[in-house]
Image (tube, rainbow, N blue to C red):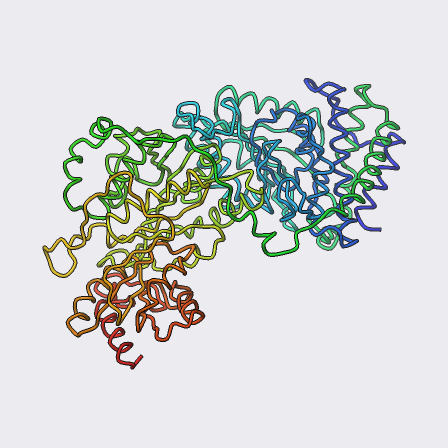
Amino acid sequence: MDRVEIVHENLTTRLPAGDFPSGRAPVPPLTGIEGVALFRAQCLSRALDRESRAMQKAGQGFYTIGSSGHEGMAAVAAALRPTDPAFLHYRDAAFQIARAGQVPGVNITWDMLLSFACSAEDPISGGRHKVLGSRALMIPPQTSTIASHLPKAVGAAYAIGLARRHRPEHRLYEKDAIAVCSFGDASANHSTAQGAINAAGWTAVQGTPLPLMFICEDNGIGISTRTPKGWIENSMRHRPGIRYFKADGLDMFDTFRAAREAAEYTRRHRKPAFLHLRTVRLYGHAGADVATSYLPREEVERDEANDPLLHSARLLAEEGALAPEDALAIYQETCARVTQVAAEVIQRPRLKTAADVMATILPPKRSCAPTNGPSPEARAARFGSDMKAMDAPQTLSKCLNMALTDLMLENGEIILMGEDVGLKGGVYGVTQKLQSRFGRDRVIDTLLDEQSILGLAIGLAGNGFVPIPEIQFLAYLHNAEDQLRGEAATLPFFSRGQFTNPMVLRIAGLGYQKGFGGHFHNDNSLAVLRDIPGLVIACPSTGADGARMLRECVRLAREENRVVVCVEPIALYPMRDLDEAGDGGWMTPYPAPDERIAMGEIGQHGDGEDLAIVTYGNGHYLSRQAETALAQAGTRTRIIDIRWLAPLPVEAILQAVRDCAHVLIVDECRFTGGQAEALMGHFHEAGVPSFARVTAEDSFIATGPAYGATLPSKEGIIAAAKALVEGRS
């Protein structure tokens, strides 16, 4: 007999006999009537666990990770409000079930079984994953999260407080809500969890409102690895800025008491709390995992003897609210009902085609209040002396700064955040003066943690803000890229667009910085961004393009709910000259505030028919330099600036090169994984007769005089162009 049936048999045998594990007497404030309702939720959670395994064995269910042993989370849900956003651990079915009892019109049994069956009618993911989540219950879906949801929970709590001071048009959370985030004891050791908990305390000790409730469900084990006894309490009890609470998660009365105290503390003081719950894990980790293959049988049986449902029945019997035989009847009736509903659910339609699956990759558009932009007087007041500079040619960094000022004037929902973006004005001065112009609430100097920066952005976006986080250098993104890949980009996909987190992530990146930083500050690989479904990647090269494209990036986030990354070439931030010192050939006037470059709109310089150079970023700059020498050699050239690297504007590029004899791709990213790989494939499929590429080497970038040795150069472009035109490539 497997452990699932052993646990079931223990219940059906011990409940009517009143054979209960020992424990404390019931404590207030939970009443017996409330306790019976929670027991029903716990029984439903257990019955769904059993049914999910039966469905999987029958080929009608496709993923099982159960909540058995964690049914005490039903009491946590009862201690909270159904409008409190809850970012849940994957073992928290009982929480979602109990919360459904607080919201009329939710058929939680039907909904959760649809998810188990991967039915296209599943109201949260539409059959894309077995996830907890519900828009009606304010539970954004989480997949198999290993702490990756903690940073955005911190951001959500911050967003609740910020929305009381600056209410966004699309605010989702109630002004007195608290954000709730649950996770396991093993996940608490993950660097992501430690960073988020640290960020919460760091924020709270500075007096910033952060209504956040962490819940650690401590079953003492992570898959097969034991958590040291006392580890969670000893490491979390004295965290600065965070109040620690503790309860026995097997005891619904004690759990409700502690959860109510923690929630009241957080709601009243707007400060984070940490609720530590003792739980047990039944059935092993997930699916076919057999706990007795790595744990002594006596340990497994000890946990099974401490079944939370037996503890709940004991407490309710002592309270005089539910007789043992009635508890058994509730459990058996619940199991029978779940089996009956499952038989209907497995007949419901499932996703079939790629189009079905991909229908939710792009989030839905949203209606935004129209704006006429800031008045001339408001602009003059905020820009100050910079107004005089607008008519003169400017660098990329200055144009971006001006564009950010105009955008923040026009949209009060825009929030900037990142390391050093405020007082210092960013590492390269792009955000200079913005904090003095708009205040510390809207230009936030964060702690040094990229995961927390992106988590803050995701949380803010979920409550209606338009965040513009900054990552100082492209190489630093790798510390936190899962916040884009696993969290921001997947949320609309797994929620059918019911939850979104639009943002514009600004990253100073790419190479060509002379003698500074090596590969830590000169990272020329965009591969980790290019393969994230639904992500938009913008890469401007001139000041005018930078301003216009940044405006489109904000529009995409604000109106289309998109996650956008704007990669800003560091080496071009201060660039003034093009062909020779003092010519000012790379500077541009700041474009009028209503001008923008639409996503997918490419740039073209020249109309020569001998050669088209397809490029972007620093490659655009170098190709423009090479153009002069090529013209002197008699090669008539046009230069195509891709601008938008994802989605790649393939049709526009093909149209732009259609009447050229030869096409040269200049890609400053590496030979492997760069944009050139995709472009070569597209040109081949389109039948372009003659094309070649110039790319960076598959190498990191050196510091010092060899900073450009592995990168495309003006001379290399000229040589490759001549070889192509002359048929030598």
Q: Quadrant of residue 182?
A: top right
Q: Position of residue 281 (x, y in %)?
A: 70, 42
Q: Residue lying farthest left? A: 582
Q: Quadrant of residue 689?
A: bottom left
Number of disc labels: 0
Closer to the camera, 553 or 164? 553
Q: Residue lying farthest front? A: 659
* Residue at the spot 74% in from the left edge and 31% down from the top edge: 41
In the figure, 697 relative to 434: above or below? below
Closer to the camera, 10 or 405? 405
* Residue at the spot 63% in from the left edge and 33% down from the top edge: 277
Closer to the camera, 354 or 302? 354
Q: Position of residue 291 (x, y in %)?
A: 73, 51
* Residue at the spot 74% in from the left edge and 23% down from the top edge: 35
Q: Residue lying farthest bottom? A: 728
Q: Position of residue 300 (x, y in %)?
A: 75, 46
Q: Quadrant of residue 305?
A: top right
In the figure, 161 relative to 506: above or below? above
* Residue at the spot 87% in from the left edge and 31% down from the top edge: 329
Closer to the camera, 639 or 292? 639
- In the picture, which quadrant includes the C terminus? bottom left
Q: Is residue 41 left or right of residue 129?
A: right
Q: Is residue 511 left or right of residue 466?
A: left
In the figure, 713 relative to 649: above or below? below
Q: Is residue 239 left or right of residue 587?
A: right
Q: Position of residue 701 (x, y in %)?
A: 31, 63
